Amino acid sequence: MPEYLTEAQFAVLEAACEALIPAVDGHPGARALGVADYIDGALGAFSVDPPRIFAGGPYSGRFGGEPGFAKFTKLSKFQELAWRTRIEGSAGIPEREINGPVVGWQQIYTDGLAALGDDFLECEPDEQLRRVQADTVLFPVIWAHCGEGAYGAPEYGGNRETLGWQAIQYPGDIQPRGFTDEEVSQP
Amino acid sequence: MTEFDCDAVIVGTGPAGATVAEVLTAAGQSVIMLEKGANHLMSLEPPFAMSGEITNDEIKFLRRYFLEPDPLLEPRTFRRTEAAGDREFTGSVNVLPTGLGGGGFHADGKLPRFREVDFHLLSEHGPIDGANIADWPLEYDELEPYYAEAERIIGVAGDSTGNPFAAWRSGEYPMAPGADMYCAVVTGAAAQRLGYNPYRAPTGANTVEYDGRPACNNCGFCAFFGCPIDAKGDPVAPLRHALHTGRCEIRCESFVSEIVLDASGKTARGVKYLDTDGVEHEVTARAVVLGAGAFETPRLLLRSDVGNRTDLVGRHLMFHLQTFAVGQMPFRLHGYKGRAVTHLMDDPIVPDALAQAAAKDAGLPYIRGGIVEHGAAGHPVMEAMYSPPGPMHSRMMLESPMRDCMAGFTMQGEDLPLLTNRIDLDPKVKDVWGFPAGRVTYSPHKHDVVASQHWAPRLEAVMKEAGAVNTFSATSPPLPGSLGESHNLTPQSRHIMGGARMGDDPDTSVFDRWQRLHDVPNVICSDSSVFPTSTGYGPTLTIVALAIRAARELAGLPPLTSVRPAGA
Ligand SMILES: Cc1cc2nc3c(=O)[nH]c(=O)nc-3n(C[C@H](O)[C@H](O)[C@H](O)COP(=O)(O)OP(=O)(O)OC[C@H]3O[C@@H](n4cnc5c(N)ncnc54)[C@H](O)[C@@H]3O)c2cc1C
Ligand code: SF4
């Protein structure tokens, strides 16, 4: 079950992300990477406490140490103000309108996914890609989120089982192991 | 007799503020440090351990403003010229992190010294039309012992024999340099073959255990992140030293809104600050130290209407014109391993015959570029955003021409001081505290542009010599008419200087040679606002060296001295 979006919106989101990051030989597509889960998790970040904004630390446990990433960091008062505004929008709340109204990600996705059209799921990937890119409000937001959801730390909900990192031969967070001098200096 | 809350109230906890706190508390003085950002760095209780929030996490640090000022709360505005209207952009403009430690521990800490000529550029090379080049009110020889002390406090690892252009030194670096990154092994050898002089970068990261902190383990999340294992010295070390004395109190999430003067208008009584509930507090002190960084210090002076008798506050703002020369290699460089950059070269700072000819052709007396950082691209989220969507995307991520196979030179080109390049208060846009946002008006001088255009192809030629199959170059800010203009108009160098220059003449400078405000001498600035020129080097070691000098003077301690070794 998606956390913020409806099942129907989630299906459109998954298809849109797959059109942007499709599976090719050796590289899983956005669906297998859980990119839509990442986005849905960001839209519903405040449904958990502490909110799913900043992963904890100091280590993930993947290369030693206690797994701390999964325990998210408590937000400061101002961080909460900024992130609620960014995600939920200013919604007419005066403190959130420092320089005027802000349209939040929730609204951008809700409107943007609807505008992709009722037939979006049936379209060919080329056409899906064209429609997503043509939306000048949705595209910059979803495209940045695709990069984060495919290649960011898995604790945020994407990059499932680090498949994104494995595909591109990238180890991800490496502390506390680090790299030896030879690993740094040799080809 | 007036009672004060402390001897000095320090605004900002980055390298500039932290250094002053260390020197003053060691001299027996009490300080209160006010920091507008939160504390994600370390416990304020002994033994002042790291808080564990600094991690290898690209989303948190590069995408979600964990340390950077959030543009929804603290927007800045930008325009290239006054003629462009009130503003062309609102958002993040060349920001440094906010929070305990400021930008220092977030930087990758390449910490070179300036050269002798940098302190008297005007006298040695003469003026350039349209720029207000000025000599510094001190020379390298006077600053040398403070550079040595700064390197000792921070813990700089370097090799004093590597750079043929380096200024003289009274002693060795505290530590030997760390492991050379493979990308720099490749581009460094190519640069040498073409007659350039790459050297191991002096870096504020431990290569052995130093001052109770461990050696760096080359994790690769260095520039823009912060060190999860406490191997970076600046400004963690001076903050800890100050806290250990018991005479340093740190208050985070405390935004200094105003410098408060007494009735005479010639002495500061302290500062006012707001907590996150908007409640106003006042701290009184014998001295007010401004270490808010070269963007926020001028903004605070303007907001307080202090020190601006000559209308110079905010002017002569400098950023470094960055030139990127990129080479795509037919092999992987794994630039995600190591301390972000391990090699520098100073050649563009010291004009050779070709650079002199280019200057002459452009009608300029000289061109000085800046240090060249030998780097590579590190992490994949940014790579993904710059790779086109669709099937091409996944294939490009597999082959990684934009990251794992990409080497990059960054030249930190000298940015001449112009009266028209400035910070002022935006007439409309506000921050979360309700104060006018800082507005940047900035265009690089012709000198900076010519230097960039001269060096870009020469640096691309080094990339080709290193084996690049494809090269290109770009600048930050983008040059007029270039493709980059449609992407991001604003400078992103993270090197911010000027805005309240120092000098001996109160009519042409804001601070004096001891970094005291000419008009209100118990207000001291310890950050790079005071730099009269930008040079082509990262500013931070010089900020720290100057801060030690200014703080010792404030504390009534004797000047440091050093001896130039025979033949040096
Ligand atoms: C990714 C990156 C890499 C870098 N690499 C290098 C490098 O290799 N070499 C180099 O020399 N430099 C480098 N820099 C630049 C370096 O970080 C800065 O020069 C340095 O941090 C400046 O120190 P500062 O103390 O003057 O200011 P800052 O570090 O900006 O600290 C100022 C502090 O004051 C606080 N503050 C501001 N206004 C107020 C207010 N009104 N009230 C209370 N607090 C306030 C801020 O929140 C901040 O914490 C890099 C920067 C970045 C971001
Ligand atoms: S590369 Fe070294 S100094 Fe930099 S963050 Fe990693 S361990 Fe720390």
Image (cartoon, coloured by chain):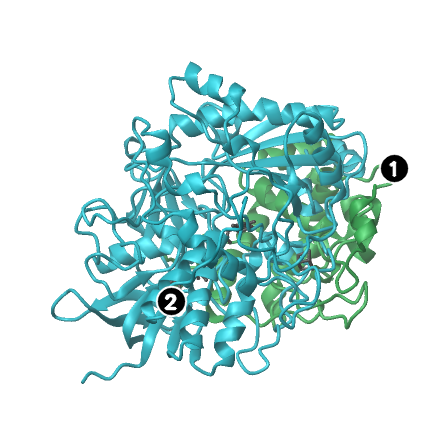
Chain colours: A green, B cyan
- Viewer-side residue, B375 vs A19: B375
**Residue A187 point in image, percent of width and height:** 83, 41
Name the residue at 56% across, 63% down.
Answer: B152
Q: Position of residue B442 (x, y in %)?
A: 36, 37
Q: Chain of mark 1?
A: A
Question: Is residue B6 rendered to the left or right of residue B395?
Answer: left
Q: Is residue B251 left or right of residue B193?
A: left
**Which residue is found at the position 65% from the left and 41% from the top?**
B199
Q: Is mark 1 within 8 Å of ligand 2?
A: no
Residue A110 lies, in percent from the top left, at 58, 50
Q: Does A6 sit left or right of B411 as displayed?
A: right
Tell me: B535 left or right of B50: left
Question: Does ligand 1 reach within 8 Å of label 2's beta carbon?
Answer: no
Q: Which mark is residue A25?
A: 1
In this rendering, is residue A101 above or below B214? above
Chain label for disc 2: B
Q: Which mark is residue B552?
A: 2
Which quadrant of the structure image shows residue B195? top right
Q: Is residue B70 visible?
A: no
Cα–Cα span, label 2 and label 1: 64 Å
Which image quadrant for residue B25?
bottom left
Query: Contact, CB < 8 Å: mark 2 with mark 1?
Result: no
Outermost residue, right direction?
A: A25
Residue B389 x, y percent position in the rendering = 69, 35
Residue at the image point whose x is 73% and y is 49% from the top:
A151
Work out which residue is located at the far left of the displayed protein and give it: B264
Query: For numbered disc 2, what is the local secondary structure?
Result: helix
User: Mark 1: which secondary structure?
Assistant: loop
The amino acid sitting under disc 1 is Asp
Q: Amino acid at mark 2?
A: Arg
